[in-house]
Image (cartoon, rainbow, N blue to C red):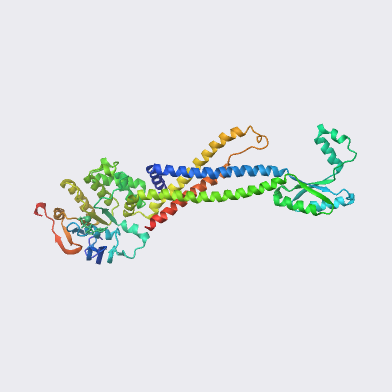
Amino acid sequence: MHGSEKDAIIRMFHVYRYYSARKALCDITLEISKNEFVFISGPSGAGKTTLLKLLYLGERVSEGQVLVDGINLARIPRKRIPFLRRKFGIIFQDYKLIPSKSVFENVALVLEAAGMKSSLIQKKVRGVLRLVNLEDKSNSLPPTLSGGEQQRAAVARAVVGDPQIILADEPTGSLDAASAGVILELLKGIHIRGATVIVATHDEALINQIGGRVLLLKEGRLESAAFVEKQYDSSLS
Amino acid sequence: MTVLYLKRAIQDILQNRFLNFVTIITISLSILIVSSAILFFINAGQIIALWQKGIRIMAYLKPEMAATALPGLTQDIQALDGVDSVRFISRDEALAELKAQMKRQSFLFENLAENPLPDGFEIRMDPSAQTWKNIEAVAARVEAFEPIAEVEYGQRWLGRFSRIFDLFRLAGYAMGGLFFIATVFIVANTIRLIIYSRREELEITRLVGATDRFIKIPFYIEGLIQGALGAICGLAILFFLFVLLSSNVEEGFFSDLFQIRFLSPGVMLPIVLGSALVGWLGCHLSLKQFLKV
Ligand SMILES: Nc1ncnc2c1ncn2[C@@H]1O[C@H](COP(=O)(O)OP(=O)(O)OP(=O)(O)O)[C@@H](O)[C@H]1O
Ligand SMILES: [Mg+2]
């Protein structure tokens, strides 16, 4: 059932977000289809992270409407918010790993919170840590990891629950080309299995490497929407 | 799922060892004070009950009373509420008893021209009705009967003592209540500190889709464990002190009359459960505050 371009999973209507007087987002209207692979691009401070936060209710809109999978976020009761969040796998820009828990526990937390059986959790977490090449760090605490290792742990946590939507905020920011390639393969894989993937990045090389619709933000406004074809020579950027 | 929550609660306690340790010690001190009061009241109550069991009311007759009125009067007294048995003791019997009790001084009685003792009744109370109120009421009713000259119930002071004791007990309840409230706040405060030190972690846990329930249950378990462990420590300290003290007292004058006993399991269990409830309440208070934010 995936892949129907008409079938929007995310809609925003005239969304504003102010921080005191400052407009972080201004009159954003957009639609993202099920199983789309979308980039949100733009310079630092453009509002990329803020836009993602509005989707999982990390922040509330100041004005406008947001719909996720048909649910109007303005009307969602407090008790349903955790279930909204389970639709998302989120790679936070600052990783947000729990420093006192091991990599394994950090990743497992998602599945525990969703009430999965512990034998199954063991299996899934081990599998996903193998995928991001962190098997040998599974018992390490995040502060003892390198930036890239932390980022891969964050990716593992985002994908372990097989979410409908992946939100990736600068998912390759701390990685060398080889590690970034592994992460990209992962995101592509999960996209092929039916997930909608939204990547916020100002890394044009990354965009060109995969290709997809690019929403360009500038100073909180949606500047343009363009479709970028996959390019094999990333030096073109 | 339950195992998972328990595991998380224990992990949490171990991660916040110092805070939890201080809380458990504080709770155990409260429990120590409250349960030593309970220990005192239970033992003192038992001593009083023991004394009360031996109580009888003596009613002395006026000398000019006619012997024919005797059966009727016995019946009247017997009919009073709470009276178990009535025994007539004639003045001759009373003298004989007195002589028997004072064998060594029996020469005192040898030259008595006349028996100075009055006839009387020995009244024993129904054990179930043997409260001070009942004893006093019966004594007053008996005293009102026409042929009765005087009523005596030994250890009148015991009545006064038991009233003071009741007052103490009331103060004990009030104190227990205060400690209860204070301990709730102590636990609330610890949990608040723990939540505060882990607010980032809790926020992340929420962002990955955890429900309030998932976040709260380990804290409740933590509160319960703190309360129960605190109570167990407090009772252990009390037991230790009890053994230490009673091994000295045992030799004293109480020992043949009365055995001082430690709290029975039937008393200790409610103390531990009550303390666990305190932990739960304290936790509930701070979680309510936390979740408002
Ligand atoms: N909690 C906040 N309080 C005040 N201002 C904020 C807050 N969060 C974001 N902003 C402001 O909103 C604007 C957009 O921030 P945002 O984090 O969305 O940018 P971004 O596009 O993700 O930038 P970057 O590429 O550097 O991550 C910035 O000017 C920022 O200062
Ligand atoms: Mg950002």
Q: In this view, does B61 lie to the left or right of A110?
A: right
Q: In this view, does A109 lie to the left or right of B32?
A: left
Place of residue A26 in the rendered image (x, y in percent of width and height, measured from the top left): 22, 65
The single residue placed furthest to the right in the displayed view is: B113
- Where is A135 relative to A165, above or below? above
Place of residue B289 in the rendered image (x, y in percent of width and height, measured from the top left): 40, 56
The one nearer the camera, A149 or A161, is A149
Place of residue A135 in the rendered image (x, y in percent of width and height, measured from the top left): 26, 42
Q: Is residue A28 visible?
A: no
Q: Where, by quadrant of the figure, is residue B211 drawn?
A: bottom left
| Quadrant of the frame with the N terminus of chain A | bottom left
Q: Is residue A5 left or right of residue B33?
A: left
Q: Can residue B49 be seen in this view?
A: yes
The one nearer the camera, A7 or B290, is B290
- Where is B263 relative to A60, above or below? above
Name the residue at 56% across, 34% down. Answer: B244
The count of marks equals 0
Image quarter for ligand 2 equals bottom left
| Quadrant of the frame with the C terminus of chain A | bottom left
Place of residue B11 in the rendered image (x, y in percent of width and height, measured from the top left): 38, 43
